[in-house]
Amino acid sequence: MSEFIQQLINGLSLGSIYALIALGYTMVYGILKFINFAHGEIFMLGAFCGLYTAKALGVDAPDIPMALVILLFTMVVTALIGVTIEKLAYKPLRNSSKLTVLITAIGVSLFLQYLGQLIFGAAPQSFPTIIENVSFDIAGATIGSNQIVVIISAILLMLALRFIVMNTKMGTAIRAVSNNLTAASLMGININNVISFTFVIGSSLAGAAGILYSINYPSIDPLMGLLPGLKAFIAAVLGGIGNFPGAAVGGIIIGLVETFTVGYFSPTYRDAIAFAILIIILLVKPTGLFGKKDIEKV
């Protein structure tokens, strides 16, 4: 029982991070109908932004107020990076083929990976301890306070996203553009502003995920966004790409499956299991768990 509880908390903690990244994928897809494969690198930049912000502030011991400052500042920085990428790389291709935009997204991803190695160095760096990790014994399982912080923070951020989407004017515009971009434009909605806001929100969540991931796994490097980014994409597909609750649920499922695979089988299969899920979901239910069939007129 203790092993089950241990792996459950580990899975919820990791899955919460995947869910935050997956929400960025699904937001962009819901508006522009393409996958922003550079999103994993925004996650990586969030981790490094947190590292250098902590160094600049002189944080060398656990400090919750400073941790909040680092988190919020990182979210602002990654939001600006995300909207800059959209303006420079994706906006000029707005009327181009989906293949062109996809290749561009992969190119931006590679550019950020190698730019990160040039600026930050290729060697892994240690992320500072910005919050104190206290261990609790629950039914024989050792649960770290860091894991609880990650889960609660992710839930609060997802609730904030839901509030923005469901209860604000910009959220209404996002839902309208996601439903029918042309009709929304004819109704007077500024499509460019909606797209930019979508990148702002998605990138800020990826930046927050970078901080939360680094709290649990305090070794970061410029290629750290590759696998979490791909797994978050799988989570978005699993839940139903373009569906917000689906992305969150998909992230939790991927995190749980990965940690239970490590705990009960072998760490060797932790990455393979995620891609196996992708293959199965594409074969059995391509629209995902919560996705709907999209009828395309030709």
Image: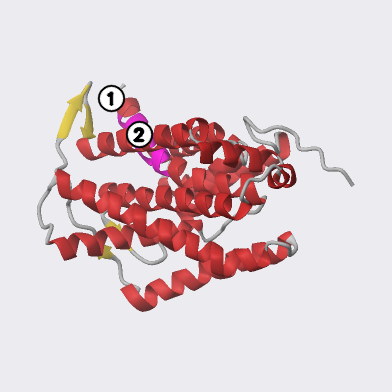
Answer whether labels 1 and 2 touch (C-beta < 8 Å).
no
Q: In the image, is 102 to the left or to the right of 73? A: right
User: Which residue sits at x=16%, y=45%?
Assistant: 65
User: Which residue sits at x=53%, y=55%?
Assistant: 196
Residue 274 can be seen in this image:
yes
Q: Tell me: residue 132, above or below residue 249.
A: below
Using the image, tell me which numbered label, if any, was put on residue 2.
1
Among the 4 quarters of the image, the one containing residue 10: top left
Amino acid type of the residue tagged 2 in the rendering: Leu
Q: Main SS type for the magenta part?
A: helix
Using the image, tell me which numbered label, if any, was put on residue 156.
2
Q: How many marks?
A: 2
Label located before the other in sequence (1 or 2): 1
Q: Nearer the viewer, residue 152 or 217?
A: 152
Among the 4 quarters of the image, the one containing residue 78: bottom left
Q: In the image, is 147 to the left or to the right of 95? A: left
Where does residue 149 sit, x and y in percent of width and height? Answer: 26, 37
Quadrant in which the N terminus is drawn:
top left
Q: Nearer the viewer, residue 237 or 185?
A: 185
Q: Residue furthest right?
A: 298
Residue 225 can be seen in this image:
no
For the residue labelled by badge 2, is the local secondary structure a helix, a strand or a loop?
helix
User: Which residue sits at x=52%, y=49%?
Assistant: 198
* Distance CA(mark 1)–CA(mark 2): 27 Å
Q: In the image, is 256 to the left or to the right of 191? A: left
Q: In the image, is 251 to the left or to the right of 36? A: left
Where does residue 81 sit, x and y in percent of width and height? Answer: 43, 63
| Range covered by the magenta-colored residues | 6-17
Amino acid type of the residue tagged 1 in the rendering: Ser
Q: Tell me: residue 109, above or below residue 193.
A: below
Using the image, tell me which numbered label, if any, was put on residue 176.
none
User: Which residue sits at x=45%, y=53%?
Assistant: 203
